[in-house]
Amino acid sequence: MGKIWRISGPVIIAEKMRGSQVYEVVDVGDDRLTGEIIGLEGDKAVIQVYEDTAGLRVGEPVTGTGEILMVDLGPGMVGNIYDGVQRSLVTMQEDIGDFILRGTRTFALDRDKKWRFTPSVKAGDAVGEGDIIGSVPETGLIEHKIMVPIGVEGKILEIHEGDFTIEEPVAVIEHDGTRRELTMVQRWPARKPRIYKRRFDPVDLLVTGTRIIDYLFPLALGGKAAIPGGFGTGKTVNLQQMARWSQTHLNIYVGCGERGNEMADVLHSFKQLKDPATGRMLQEKEIFIANTSNMPVVAREISIFIGITMAEYFRDMGYDVLLVADSTSRWAEAMREIGSRLEETPGEEGFPTYLGSRLSSFYERSGRVECVGNPGRMGSATVIGSVSPPGADFSEPVTQATLRIVDALYSLDVALANKRHFPTINWLQSYSLYADSVDKWWNKISNEYTDVRNEALATLQKEAELEEIVRLVGPEALPEDDKLLLLVARMLREDFLMQSAFHPVDTYTEPKRNHKMIRTIMKFYEISRDMVDSGTLVSDISALKLKQRISRMKDIPNDEFDAYVANIMSDMEQSSVHEEEGGDN
């Protein structure tokens, strides 16, 4: 047992700690606050404390636990709400009320609840690490696969079907004469990546329901992406949309240093929304980690790693998992504060020199992999993090370090927010390196995908080039072809790229509908070019009722959409035929 020698905010230096290890969890002070050793020098230990240190005194005891910070993994995680160090906020509210007291301890998983375990192997079978030995119906959307812990193997001596708590043995295995009981809970170090057999390139689209992402800048399952943006550009809303509607098996939302009212809104909305694919409540496929701005700053750093460890665990079951982190800038600010209190040599803008490597250790745990164990299975963990650069300055260190890691960028634009264009993803500054790899996926929807996407992006790019001329000479000085391009580019922006997160239909767009919407606009462009070549003015084309009908596409209910678009396409074909007949005469 040691004692406190120095206190500097969330950083404690304790003496008489010889024999301790780095990253060991310790109890600090008379209130037994949770801390973690991050440095050792002689008999002194540098400890970061995950709770408020106000009131601590020099000389109070510091006790080592002999364990590093672990994540509890097992039935009961889905639908739960955790703080930054995986204390269940649901359990704490039931036990102590609405306010968290210092030193409060609670289990991450309910130790008393019984789960129905159904075995998938039998006595006498040989099993190894990662093998699935049974399952538990955790929610209506998630079947929790019970796996042999990493590093464990042997022959099944006993396995039982029935109702068990997570700590009761469901099976007994033997290896080299040693018996071991298997329960439904595992523990894994938060900072250590879980193992896998092989890693594969991401090739399948992560369907988010957001049109500009899915179609123009697609994100693949197992990919990594960043959403940087200034204040008021909608980072949180974009991440909430992805956590709500992404067509993955499980979504994990990490609120890292964000405002408490935003996190409360997330938790409230998920209790009301339904998954569009199954019709079941979205809460049945979500895990929440709430480490808001008024919670201890040190817990922000570990909350990110707890989230990605959970994602890897469900990935190992063969599931596609999405983790969204809002925001990594608040996480980096926590590292900067700890670094300054440790008197480390600062890097750019005061951030620690290891900022880039720490960001990489988080984002690089994403991926699409072949899982360890039998039966053979594939799983993926997709990571999306928001970045909050001060003053929307993308040259600041956190944004630049993130851009060197991720393969998809969704750049949020303050100018678009001021125009009330949401989502504010700037189509000229954003990019996705997954566009080519998901081509095969999209071609199953339509073999026109690549051509339509490229034409739409080219149209938006040409519009940006023409804007310089328009500002100088005005739109009336442009030839009719350029006027038409500006008209169609505006249709793309307003009728396709703009999307309301609060409209019951427009909030989520499935891929087939996505393609039909943009294909209809580009078909209108094709027909209109022929009309312009025949002498029709763009002002007359702009006044067509057909254009107004196209603008209403995104509000049409899904069960009426196909017929609505088919009718528009039929009318455009007829217009094209009449135009050709007029030209022949």
Image (cartoon, helix red, strand yellow):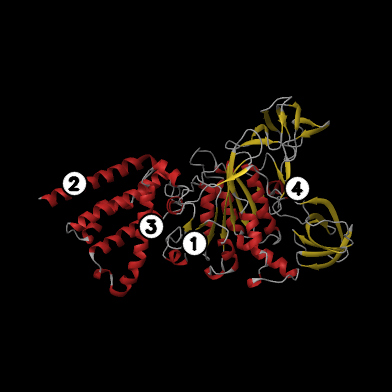
Give the percent coordinates (x, y) of residue 151: 74, 40
> According to the image, label 4 marks what residue?
106
Image disc number at residue 577 = 2
At 44% from the left and 61% from the top, the residue drawn is: 426
Q: Nearer the viewer, residue 565 or 221?
A: 221
Residue at disc 3, secondary structure: helix
Separation of residues labelled 4 and 3 (CA atoms): 52 Å
Q: Amino acid at mark 3?
A: Leu
Residue at disc 2, secondary structure: helix
Image disc number at residue 582 = none
Image disc number at residue 457 = 3
Vertical placement of residue 63 versus 561, above or below: below
Separation of residues labelled 4 and 1 (CA atoms): 40 Å
Residue at disc 4, secondary structure: loop
Camera sees residue 87: yes
Q: Amino acid at mark 4?
A: Thr
Q: Amino acid at mark 2?
A: Val
Separation of residues labelled 3 and 1 (CA atoms): 16 Å
Tell whether label 4 touches label 2 (CB within 8 Å).
no
Using a 10 Å C-alpha cutoff, classify the residue at mark 1 as few (fewer than 14 neighbours), some (14 to 19) or many (20 or more).
many
Using a 10 Å C-alpha cutoff, classify the residue at mark 2 as few (fewer than 14 neighbours), some (14 to 19) or many (20 or more).
few
Using a 10 Å C-alpha cutoff, classify the residue at mark 3 as few (fewer than 14 neighbours), some (14 to 19) or many (20 or more).
some
Q: Nearer the viewer, residue 137 or 521?
A: 521
Tell whether label 1 touches label 4 (CB within 8 Å).
no
